[in-house]
Image (cartoon, coloured by chain):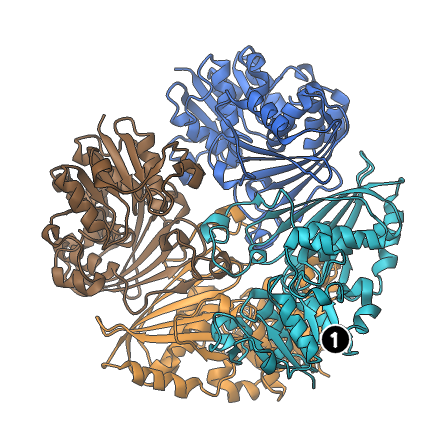
Chain colours: A blue, B cyan, C brown, D orange
Amino acid sequence: MPDVAVLGASGYAGAIAATLLHRHPYFKLSHVTARSESGAMLEAIHPRTRVPLLLEDYDPAVQGDADAALVCWPHGVAAPAVAALRERGVRVVDLSADFRLRDRATYDHWYGRHGAPELFGAGVYGLPELYREAIAASDLVANPGCYPTAALLGLAPLARAGVIEDVVIDAKSGVSGAGREPSRTTHFIAADENMTPYKVEGHRHTPEIEQELAVLGASRPISFTPHLVPLAQGELVSCYVTASRTLTDSELADLYREAYEDERWVELALGPPGVLEVRDTNYCRISVHVDGRTGRVLVFSSIDNLWKGAASQAVQNLNLMFGRDESEGLT
Amino acid sequence: MPDVAVLGASGYAGAIAATLLHRHPYFKLSHVTARSESGAMLEAIHPRTRVPLLLEDYDPAVQGDADAALVCWPHGVAAPAVAALRERGVRVVDLSADFRLRDRATYDHWYGRHGAPELFGAGVYGLPELYREAIAASDLVANPGCYPTAALLGLAPLARAGVIEDVVIDAKSGVSGAGREPSRTTHFIAADENMTPYKVEGHRHTPEIEQELAVLGASRPISFTPHLVPLAQGELVSCYVTASRTLTDSELADLYREAYEDERWVELALGPPGVLEVRDTNYCRISVHVDGRTGRVLVFSSIDNLWKGAASQAVQNLNLMFGRDESEGLT
Amino acid sequence: MPDVAVLGASGYAGAIAATLLHRHPYFKLSHVTARSESGAMLEAIHPRTRVPLLLEDYDPAVQGDADAALVCWPHGVAAPAVAALRERGVRVVDLSADFRLRDRATYDHWYGRHGAPELFGAGVYGLPELYREAIAASDLVANPGCYPTAALLGLAPLARAGVIEDVVIDAKSGVSGAGREPSRTTHFIAADENMTPYKVEGHRHTPEIEQELAVLGASRPISFTPHLVPLAQGELVSCYVTASRTLTDSELADLYREAYEDERWVELALGPPGVLEVRDTNYCRISVHVDGRTGRVLVFSSIDNLWKGAASQAVQNLNLMFGRDESEGLT
Amino acid sequence: MPDVAVLGASGYAGAIAATLLHRHPYFKLSHVTARSESGAMLEAIHPRTRVPLLLEDYDPAVQGDADAALVCWPHGVAAPAVAALRERGVRVVDLSADFRLRDRATYDHWYGRHGAPELFGAGVYGLPELYREAIAASDLVANPGCYPTAALLGLAPLARAGVIEDVVIDAKSGVSGAGREPSRTTHFIAADENMTPYKVEGHRHTPEIEQELAVLGASRPISFTPHLVPLAQGELVSCYVTASRTLTDSELADLYREAYEDERWVELALGPPGVLEVRDTNYCRISVHVDGRTGRVLVFSSIDNLWKGAASQAVQNLNLMFGRDESEGLT
């Protein structure tokens, strides 16, 4: 039973990752860390985890004895911790953005100085449905951002078919996406009965989506705008695709069926997917339609931002890295 | 003091219209009707109205003694009632879609048989910020749909400037937009913590938006997709505009300032507008941005779907039709 | 692997029961029924179940081949179905009120004519923490009401200690407690941002709580008033107990620790329990306090009304009836 | 037109008070202050106010030129500001707890050192329905707490009739009651889909309710426990009264009708009152019932905690203090 540490277990994604690993039939959750709440039991901070482990301070000499680690820290501070753990031979799934991008200038532009430049670009992009083999062979996996997960699973079949001329992505997320730190934005009174676009001048997930779309075959800049909606967990990505040639509904349906019929965690829905249908699961649920009037292809893709968009996808990646069934502990 | 009747006062928009007219300094609310709940007091059905009037059955001989009527009925059934009231000389603001479209074939395609063909096209499109004079001169005003109100106020300056090459509209609405009839969709358990695209195959507000955009100078088909979000009242329209020429932020700001600086009910926001900021008001709140990476113009426009998107805009129109200050009773 | 049928799987509790049994390591979900939605797949009606079984019409000759059944029907109609299944030797957990009460006149007063009088009183009251052995020995278990589950687990230690002189129970429930049928009450617009007492003239769970409190040693009539609050699942019961003698906080703590320290599904919380902490679980979470100023004992008890208050408790009972670990399939 | 200052206009109650005064036909809003956000426009901080006034630092020499002030500050710091304003002859409605209690030891026990001991007890308790004349004659009014407002209006007729033997108050409040400062408790993710009792060891509104009940004729200690529920504004108080003699429903109805038939802002409801019915209003809505089984009297009383529970009641008091119709500016 490999030991796994979760760094940053007091955040939302970290707490769910810890819960999944605590119940996991193969892995053993051996360490949980928190910056400001160390010394408390995880289940005292997050009762729903029911994980009776003490939150430790981060210390690579301590958590470095684990076989693997999920790093649930913000970008910038994640990279040095990842580097320290990798030095000790710990296999890492990093949930920050630090190892997702492959172009250094792009990283610097959107995120600033990288915290472990020697490792920059060393991670495999951890979207199992697209890069399963590379993930299985890797010791450092960069878990995708929540919006990129939903967007890329939604758009991959079109991108691979080479038909994406242009795409507008209008994304909507529940409030957990803004993190656990209390703020004006996450105050109940600010979020309740409200919805607002945010980061309209540019969101950091934009270059990540573009990078991966380019790999898949669609290299045009995209428009991506996220919105905050009054619910806890759930993310819906509405993609408006201008196609380079006319597509029929049945052609589209075939394209997506072929892409995903063997995928355990991608569901093709007949009607537009709601986020409640994937709440607390590792599923991504997708529907695709041709807008008969404009010829645009509409793709709707929903996930739970804390699960498939973060914690459960990290466990899915960890399963792959250890040669296990990727769904173990997720059902 | 002109007498005003509200037909369909048991619906959400009708109840708010009745409330506004009941407190109005100039008009006198003389009749309220309801189909299945007649005989009850309006305030017993909708306590928040605090309107102690008996809900009557619809009878043109009864409500036809009013000087004006707000018809808050669904399309199809609204038209014959409007016709009957007009015959008796009653000035009408119709909140249904029956008099909004000007092309008969388009109406038939989206709505079916018209209930008063002789009056088809006789209404003035009731968006005061665009058609103030025509409204003031009219006896039959077609109150705009909620999504068209937000979309058209958001896009009008660009359309008039002739720079709209293409536009994708991603719209989000609270649950009151689905009406007061209990249904699977409006059940709390279905809507709470959920969000879903709907009518992805085509929503009836599409031709209405296209018709009015064409009048303003933008005649291309649009992509319009609405989404249901878990809040009561509020509508946000996110418009992704491909412009026919490069626009700067300051050019855009000027365009919108010129268009709206004298408009009492349109607010230009520095940041993206939330729907809470316009809740229970007649305001439309707009922000506009250039997406530097793609050159697209992003327009966000928020209203309260039951107020500016229905009831308060109807009263604004009624004020104009009677030569009053259009803001009377709305502040 | 015993076959289990879920009657009424299209309701909220039935759908969760079906989900739990579908994933259960021991039982096999063999039938799901629905009255008006038969012919559809359960997962089409309730995507979150991910149960790919066809909803059948109820037919005792069909579902009667199962080894056990969970009957998730309303009172009145449940009893005859239970009788028909029992005749075929099917072991039954009935989630309705039909077999909970032991006094026929009380049943008639609160529920009307019983649908299978010959079986009246034949059920064992299915609160495992109180009646584990009797449940294990029974073929017909009456699954408790949601409020009684929370109230009785909260009050049992005090009742058994013989110190309850009087008790006021103020209960709060999420909207799923009102069932899946769309209605004025369950409409999003009626429930959202609202809370209301209901059934203030008397709620049917009152005699059920009184019956079981009397068994435990507290036989005074109680005051019980439920309230509807704007959330999906979760129930909080606040009990204000006038004690027959002075109790200290440490005495109370001992009493509850002794009662529940070996109970897997009862958690004693240091602070007052929230409903989110037990969401989607079989847990009941309790805190107990002495009000120093009045001497009253305050007991707060929270459950998920659809889980411990219905579906998961039914599976817990089923486990016991088949000699399994009562927690199997619930973790 | 008397000038009025609002101290603490960046809080929820202060912002609403400023809005009401800004639109008030008689008063002129001359100053708004904020501690950490001075220098900004109030409408930039709280767009819904649409008050284009600059938030000032508190300075008694500046705001002391007003004729009246609403002090929307926390207890402790409010008292010295009130004293400074009173010295300059400013008439004050204080929304803190500093001038509500009349027993110094009780104040010290619950709140700590008083910030202006020389003024302790100098305020009139500002519940207009109970103390209209004294308020009109006073220059310093202590605006009641939100829970006491709902509880006292609900219980006053019974207390005056001398029939209250004992009372349990179970109170529920929306999240705005917890104030505008971001915290773990007010984070959307903590409050959404949750409800929790709080301050079970004793809430500061308890002595306030007891003090005023004693004045009215009921001098026994009460049990009072508040709960947090997931909505923005609204407070429901459920009172379980043990009466000293048997009361009939019609006797009760008469008692309440006599007490409130001439009160503009108290509504007697036939069924149990929801908080949505009083949202954004100065109304208190009450229903009263006899529990036939126990003889207890059940009183349900709902208000908007920010309006009748704070800001609009403060304006109601201000109207009285200046000899105006107490409803001016509130309709």
Q: Is residue D105 visible?
A: no
C300 relative position to A37: left or right: left
Q: In the rendered image of this protein, does residue D91 appear above or below residue C66?
A: below
Q: How many numbered dots are placed on residues in this image?
A: 1
State which quadrant residue D55 falls in: bottom right
Q: In the rendered image of this protein, does residue D24 appear above or below residue C47?
A: below
Counting from the top left corner in percent of width and height, residue A63 is at: 48, 21
**Who is closer to the viewer here, B18 or B64?**
B64
Counting from the top left corner in percent of width and height, residue B329 is at: 69, 76
The disc labelled 1 sits on which kind of residue?
A: Asn
State which quadrant residue B243 falls in: top right
B88 relative position to D256: left or right: right
- SS state under label 1: helix
Q: Could you tell me which quadrant the C terminus of chain D lies in?
A: bottom right
A102 relative position to A17: left or right: right
Q: Residue under label 1, please give it.
A: B319
Counting from the top left corner in percent of width and height, residue C215 is at: 12, 54
Counting from the top left corner in percent of width and height, residue A82 is at: 58, 20
